[in-house]
Image (tube, rainbow, N blue to C red):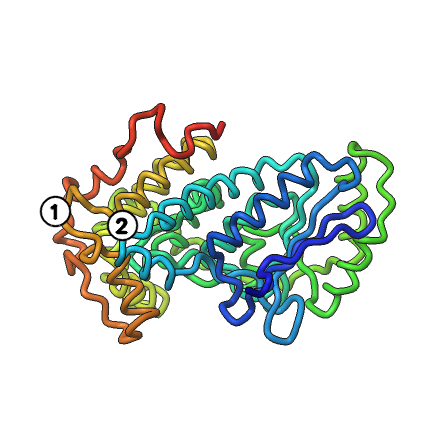
């Protein structure tokens, strides 16, 4: 099998390239394990002073970062009860936590598509660089899931109520808008990425204490000022600050403006149940630590694929149905249950937030 995660040390920097371009670098369990193994090895390697990660497209390095987890695998694994589905989320969330707490500078070049799991391996970076080709989103509600991989943590910390808007709608952001939302730090022209990558490998880092400053100085020379992109902040605050999903959607329906009508049309395509779950996830996460958020999201993901409290089988869960409609049958006509946001009750939502494991046996109890 082709290596989907390429790693090498050049000079004093460890370089990682996601090399599964034909699947938009979607993360498999083996990729999660390769990334974790590499990063843990470099943690203890005094010769490695910093880390940089990029994706690739079919023409070579850069052009695409990571479109998320391998949802086709999710669907196939769920159908046959493959235990690797559980392993994937447990190990992916541990990887996300490692990146957020990495002891060395970690630079993520978020060129091209950066969605779902791609956000999980980039949002914890010391430097998050975007380009004019960046297409960033957390679109999980579209497939009957919720914005995981720490999405509750980093989305809830966007200014105002941008997090609720991004989580519920799955809105795609370009590079400048990503910076405006607090989800990126640097803007670079894609044509300069390769030169920056090479320059990082030529750095002379004098000590671990100076690594962050040295890397930042290098990136400064390749950074550019993004064009000003206006976000509809007033409208986002007006609607997405409301207490409940029903109030948010009612307000949007009553507004005849193009933005409101586009937004309500988007929400009406997504899983009503998971819209309710997602709003509560973001609101809870705003007051939680990263480790707490990841444990909550691990609980949520278990309930998504094993919705026992809804008296449903795996094959009747929202996630399997959403992935079927989007990526398997591709009919784009998911049969959500319930079909309307008005039909979702709190009794359906609340159990998602109860752990299916005792505290001592939680799969990621060790994260702090």
User: How far from the left and from the top, in percent, is residue 367?
Assistant: 48, 30
Q: Is residue 263 left or right of residue 133?
A: left
- The CA span between labels 2 and 1 is 12 Å
Name which residue lies at 69% across and 38% down: 104
Label 2 vs 1, first from the N-terminus: 2
Q: Residue furthest top?
A: 360
Asked whether 330 or 228 is in front, the reply is: 330
**Residue linked to disc 2:** 305
The reply to whether residue 106 is visible in this rendering is yes
Tell me: residue 321, above or below residue 33.
below
User: How far from the left and from the top, in percent, is residue 81?
Assistant: 27, 52
Q: Is residue 130 left or right of residue 90?
A: right
**Residue linked to disc 1:** 311
Label 2 neighbour load within 10 Å: few <14, some 14-19, many 20+? many
In which image quadrant can residue 191 be found? bottom right
In which image quadrant can residue 54 be found? bottom right
Name which residue lies at 53% across and 63% down: 25
Q: Is residue 237 left or right of residue 314?
A: right
- Quadrant into which the N terminus falls: bottom right
């Amino acid at each position: 099998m082709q290596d989907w995660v390429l790693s090498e040390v050049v000079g004093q920097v460890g370089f990682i390239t996601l090399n599964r371009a034909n699947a938009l670098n979607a993360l498999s369990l083996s990729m999660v394990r390769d990334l974790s193994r590499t990063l843990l090895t470099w943690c203890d390697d005094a010769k490695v002073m910093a880390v940089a990660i990029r994706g690739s497209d079919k023409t070579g390095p850069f052009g695409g970062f990571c479109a998320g987890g391998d949802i086709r695998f999710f669907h196939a694994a769920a159908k046959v009860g493959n235990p690797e589905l559980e392993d994937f989320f447990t190990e992916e969330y541990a990887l996300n936590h490692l990146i957020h707490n990495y002891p060395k500078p970690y630079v993520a070049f978020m060129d091209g598509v950066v969605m779902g799991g791609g956000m999980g391996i980039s949002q914890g970076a010391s430097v998050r660089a975007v380009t004019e080709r960046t297409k960033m989103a957390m679109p999980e509600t579209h497939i009957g899931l919720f914005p995981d991989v720490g999405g509750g943590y980093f989305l809830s910390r966007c200014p105002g109520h941008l997090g609720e808007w991004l989580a519920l709608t799955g809105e795609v952001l370009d590079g400048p808008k990503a910076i405006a939302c607090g989800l990126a730090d640097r803007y670079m022209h894609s044509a300069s990425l390769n030169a920056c990558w090479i320059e990082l490998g030529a750095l002379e880092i004098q000590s671990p204490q100076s690594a962050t400053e040295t890397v930042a100085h290098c990136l400064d020379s390749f950074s550019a000022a993004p064009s000003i992109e206006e976000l509809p902040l007033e409208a986002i605050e007006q609607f997405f600050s409301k207490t409940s999903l029903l109030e948010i959607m009612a307000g949007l329906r009553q507004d005849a403006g193009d933005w409101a009508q586009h937004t309500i049309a988007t929400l009406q395509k997504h899983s009503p149940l998971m819209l309710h779950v997602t709003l509560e996830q973001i609101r809870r996460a705003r007051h939680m630590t990263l480790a707490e958020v990841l444990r909550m999201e691990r609980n949520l993901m278990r309930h998504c694929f094993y919705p026992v409290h809804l008296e449903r089988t795996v094959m009747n869960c929202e996630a399997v149905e959403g992935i079927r409609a989007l990526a398997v049958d591709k009919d784009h006509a998911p049969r959500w249950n319930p079909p309307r946001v008005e039909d979702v009750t709190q009794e359906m939502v609340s159990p998602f937030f109860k752990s299916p494991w005792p505290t001592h046996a939680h799969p990621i109890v060790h994260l702090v």
